[in-house]
Image: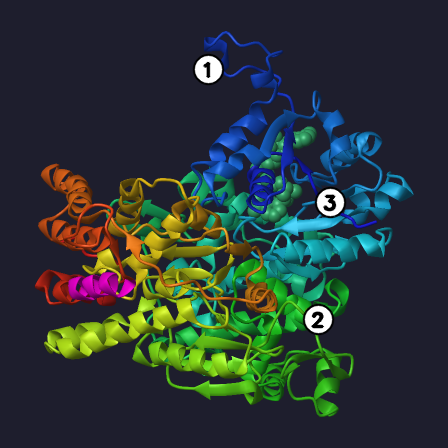
Amino acid sequence: MMRRIRKAAVIGSGVMGSGIAAHLANIGIPSILLDIVPEELTPMEKKHGATLADQSVRNRYSLEAINKLQGQKPAPLVSKQRLSYIEPGNLEDDLHKLKTVDWIIEAVVENIDVKKEIMRMIEPVRKQDAIVTSNTSGISIEEIAAGCSDEFSAHFLGAHFFNPPRYLPLLELIPTSRTNDEITTFMKAFAETTLGKGVVLCKDTPNFIANRIGTFSLLSTVNEMLANGYSIGEVDSVTGPLLGRPKSATFRTLDVVGLDTFLHVAQNVTKVASGREREVMTPPAFIREMVDKGWIGAKAGQGFYKKQPDGILEINPHTLEYERRKKLQAPSVEQAKKAKNAREKIKMMAAAEDRAGRLVWAILKPLLLFSAEKVDEIANEIQSIDQAMKWGFGWELGPFEIWDALGVAETVTRMEKEGETVPDWIKEMLDKGFDRFYHEDSFYNQGQYELPAVSEKIIHLSKADKLIMKNAGASLHDIGDGVALLEFHSETNSIGLDAIQMIRKSIVEVEQNYQGLVIGNYGKNFCVGANLMLLLMEAQDDNYPEIDYVVRQFQQASAAIRYAAVPVVTAPYGMTLGGGAEICLPSASIQAALETYIGLVEVGVGLIPGGGGNKELYLRQLERLPSGVKLDLQPIANAVFETVAMAKVSTSAEEAREIGFFSERDDWIANQAFIIAEAKRQAIHLAEKGYRPPQKRPIPVVGETGYATMLLGAKALKTGGRISEHDVKIADKLAFVIAGGRVAKGAYVDEQYLLDLEREAFLSLIGEPKTQQRMQHMLLKRKPLRN
Ligand code: NAD
């Protein structure tokens, strides 16, 4: 029988429980969220005459947790409408409901006795065959289910989410010696495909992988700071992006985690730690003092940092006084900032002999040695450690990738010269002639390079032999089965003339030799829009014919996507802004990642969409309506106007559907790594169904009266002082374009006419000094200017 997770239960409605329930809701799995029954009334409940027997009181914890989900940042839910997927309850009145679920997730306080008690409660009511997981951060999974039956234990394993569950990709799965292999295999596939997680299988050892390595590295960094007189801010200025890690670096990460939680997690290993780990894992006294004072980080308003109206202060670990935040200034820092990727930055920093370089090496050395010492104990192979650190802590390079970046042999020599003992298996690896941990797609394991279990859902783009054509902005690859992939590859995936021209050339090629085209890439963002810098330079040179040419080319590329004889499927993820959105909108189908932030944001730089985006968004709204029904076009035009004028950006693919960027023929999947394969599958599916491009048809518009209606709202905002004169000018042009210009209400116009209106409006706005100021500001400050 096929196993399915139709419904889940989450026990414990705290930070993690509610976040996990929200993520389940995001991907469409309903859940019951259960917590303990309160023993006392709150003052507010007393005031309202409630009693302890009232349902609203008995469900207080889960109700409050569900309520909180709505205001939390970053948003745990992909759409407010998803809230209805979570049913509140409590562990007394609703325990019987566990019978109805396929997966029970324990996420109660980190206390072995409480967790064991929960298993004791679950066991008699759970449906036979239902899976049970624990979200413990580091308690032994085997011990949690120690007293349970074999049948229960066969279905029980650790499933450790990272906070926030919607956004952090890592899910550590920890089977015990009693877990049925079929359950582990199912959970891995389910978590990757349906939950969209990066799954790492761990051994059942304290803190599993990411927290074991992560807490060690964080504490060894704290120790180095104390031993060699660095400040909190100085350490953070070097241990963030310069090492390919998030901006929150070391101490801001700890403030977010909470110092209390951090100490708790650290304590999990003190019993088993020996050698290097034992020395490092004893937290310094000043952190304990901070916890005693309640200065536990962001949730308390102060920790290693404290925000003041005039800036951010850092704590002095020796005096526990807050002082002005410092940054480490050193030649190596300036040099590494200019390096083109994390590998080079780390290499430069680790080799530097100045104060910053010494700090980096003193932090990396124990991390690399500790990871190498622990592989066998905590993981199945080295790749699990690297993936856990990348997916769980947001590092660009895991420890073994860092070894490779520094050069394994050179690093071993340096370490030994400094009196360190390097694990034998690394020296044996070098002796056997393997000089790196990773070779192409394989990783080193027990005397050989081993290929990872490649999922057929991931298409690797590294194989240059499948390149069809390429220019500076984009390349076209053959990805098999008669499908080609067009990939943008400028630095931020912004699109310039090169990429635009490649779209048109690709479609010609694909129409001749392939059955479908996918437009997609892997990176941080699908496409952040048109290359503003180029457009601004042309505008400042008054080179309007060139801008006109670029816009025409873009419009033609967009039309080529829409009317291609083969299906063009786009695979957006992350930021899909301006021109990026305009490439998706005309495609035959959009196969997005759930985390897609799509918007026509040109107004922010004083422009309106110029690549056909207004018309495409309008057409998508028209297509939503049943044919034959007499349309009131005005609400449709108004909705498009509002979306573009307010530069609305969806906070997820689900919201993109609600706003109108996505339609019925589009879809999303939770795992971003799978989108290109999914888009390819969709292209094949459409081709095999006998794909036919849409027909060119006249488009009904609201005309001159509709234009006036749209503009009314903007003028009211201007009168209320909410928008500027220049905003009104942009709104005016936009309304005119969407309305179809000076025609009668309900008139039919052709697409080219609408594109001409759009291009004229674009060209007139780009000549405006205030628009150019906005563009310049965006390029320099990365923020919109309100002028
Ligand atoms: P939390 O304190 O926010 O929530 C714990 C919940 O457990 C509360 O809702 C509480 O009412 C409930 N609870 C307390 N006693 C209970 C009992 N006897 N029976 C049933 N429920 C009870 O904690 P959290 O951060 O959500 O952590 C939950 C689990 O997830 C812990 O095991 C923790 O180690 C783990 N975890 C936490 C994080 C994180 O970053 N917060 C990350 C990964 C894993």
Disc 1 residue type (three-letter): Met
User: Residue 750: image x %, image y %?
Assistant: 27, 61
What x and y, as percent, mark residue 779? 24, 67
- Select label 1 or label 2 by which is in front: 1
Query: Residue at label 3?
Result: 133
Residue lying at the far front of the rendered structure: 628
The secondary structure type at the circle numbered 3 is strand
Residue at x-position 47% and y-position 76% = 486
Residue 95 location in percent, x, y? 73, 26
Which residue range is magenta in the image?
751-762
Residue 185 lies in quadrant: bottom right
Q: Is residue 34 within the magenta segment?
A: no
Which amino acid lies under the numbered mark 3 shown in the image of this protein?
A: Thr
- Closer to the camera in the image, 443 or 486: 486
Colour mapping used in the image: rainbow
Do the CB atoms of the residues marked 3 and 2 lie less than 8 Å apart? Answer: no
- Identify the image quadrant of the C terminus: bottom left
Q: Amino acid at mark 2?
A: Glu
| Secondary structure under the numbered disc 2 in the rendered image | helix
CA separation in Å, label 3 and label 1: 35 Å
Q: Is residue 10 left or right of residue 691?
A: right
Look at mark 1 in the image and give the residue it sits on.
44
Q: In the shown orientation, is residue 218 left or right of residue 158?
A: left
Q: CA distance from mark 1 to mark 2?
A: 54 Å
Q: Nearer the viewer, residue 685 or 395?
A: 685
Q: Which mark is residue 202?
A: none
Q: Earlier in the sequence, mark 3 or mark 2?
A: 3
Q: Is residue 220 left or right of residue 597?
A: right
Q: Which residue is mark 2?
A: 373
- Depth check: give the residue in front, 117 or 645: 645
Give me the C-alpha separation between circle 3 and circle 2: 29 Å
In this orientation, does residue 337 appear? yes
